[in-house]
Amino acid sequence: MPQESAFEPLEDVVFIATSDLAARTKGRALPARRFDETTSVGWVPANIGIGPLGHIVDGIPFGASGDLRLRPDPASRVRIPRIGERPAFDLVFGDLVEVDGEPWHSCPRTFLRETVRELREEFGIEARSTFEHEFVDLSAGPDHHPFSLEAFRRAEPLGSTLLALLERMGLEPENWLPEYAKHQYEITLEPTDPLTSADRAILLRDLVRDLFEAHGRRATFAPITEEGGGGSGVHVHFGLYDESGRTLLFDPDRPGRLSELGGRFAAGVIRHAPGLTALFAPLLTSYQRLRPHNWSTARAFLGVQNREALLRICPTNELDGRDPSRQLHFEFRGSDAGANPWLLLGALLRAGMAGLRESLDPAEVVEGDLDLEGRHAGLAPLPERLEDALDAMLADETVTGWFSPELVETFAAIKRDELRLLRSRSLAEQIEVYSRVL
Ligand code: GLU
Ligand code: MG
């Protein structure tokens, strides 16, 4: 018989969190009574060099020495209710700073914060965004029928518990559904400001895994969970508005009803897509998902209502006279859960800003399906393997220029370590490894 503890677990605990290049949430906790607006906790620069496989890799520019502070952003504090036997606690995201309070050059959250500031200050643009997540229930039995009520019910009571949890925490769940691929589910949240949306994406993955574990089941956000099976994506939805909330994307007279500014923003994302691929598809198995006829994408193009577009102009709901203008937005479909949400969203917004700065021509809006033999033969393919994506990233000085040299070097070292350890393994083994860590 397990011994009953003489004490109730302390629920007044605050966990101060960051998320690393492998999109793992990390941090330190303290009793809430010790937490106030001046609180920060120590952090180690070399921690950013821990890859998905769970060790600090060789070849990073950080060693055994050096110290940082993880400084909480009080606006991000949330209460996580009791989940199964695991007590309630508060979680607050922090920014990594030097010990004198200066921003740390390689903090992923600061990267997004700075990007949002540039977008506002240089272009007068406010973005609103949300992340759409797919994941797979690894503990489900053999039967599956896509989108079925049966699959929906088999996730119970976890599905409705997840919705209750997200509602209670103020994370604004939108849709919860059984998806197409085997034992796959999807959860979407309402759009919000970029930093909050990325914080929520980070939290959501941990909450889902926590909930499944508490019920003796396992969920994974890995990009694929079986050879030849459908993939799990993380689609990033974002719209652009002026400071009074008016859309900057909608123009009913242009192709796809996308404004010229929207077209130029999209052109930046399309142009830099090959250089961005290692960031949005950072795992060896990401490339099993990024294939034609997988409802993900293998080409860099802007499409209307085409689920193989890298960047899609999303449909609007105009029932009962609803106004499409504010609804019209982009969905970036290339990414998976290997990507850190702060870096991913920051990089997409920076790619769009590059399109505006370079005054690129608006991206071609592809309507309907692709004609790869004819009209669309010239659309840039995306790298097909992680090693090629890493080379493409390192060759795109615009992309690498957004980050500190230390961050780029660390990212490259992590990917090389992963390639060294996993490349020669069978696909089944790669799937197994990533399904365990994601
Ligand atoms: N599962 C597809 C992906 O890998 C997306 C399916 C959809 O939601 O359109 O991204
Ligand atoms: Mg989906």
Image (cartoon, helix red, strand yellow):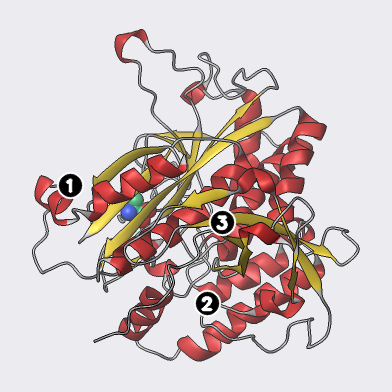
The secondary structure type at the circle numbered 3 is: strand
Residue 390, percent from left and from top: 61, 71
Residue 166 visible, this angle: yes
| Above or below 297: residue 130 | above
Pinpoint residue 114: horizontal percent, then vertical percent: 77, 47
Mark 3 vs 1, N-terminal side: 3
- Pointer 3: what residue? 91
Q: Residue sitting at 25 percent across and 57 percent down?
A: 184
Left or right: residue 288 compared with residue 414: left
**Label 3 close to label 1 by CB (< 8 Å):** no
Callout 1 environment at 10 Å: few (<14), some (14 to 19), or many (20+)? some
The amino acid type, in three-letter code, at marker 2 is Pro
Residue assigned mark 2: 52
Q: What SS does tag 1 mark?
A: loop
Q: Amino acid at mark 3?
A: Leu
Q: CA distance from mark 3 to mark 1?
A: 33 Å
Q: Residue at x 34, y 85 (%)?
A: 429
Marks 1 and 2, Cα distance to the nearest angstrom?
31 Å
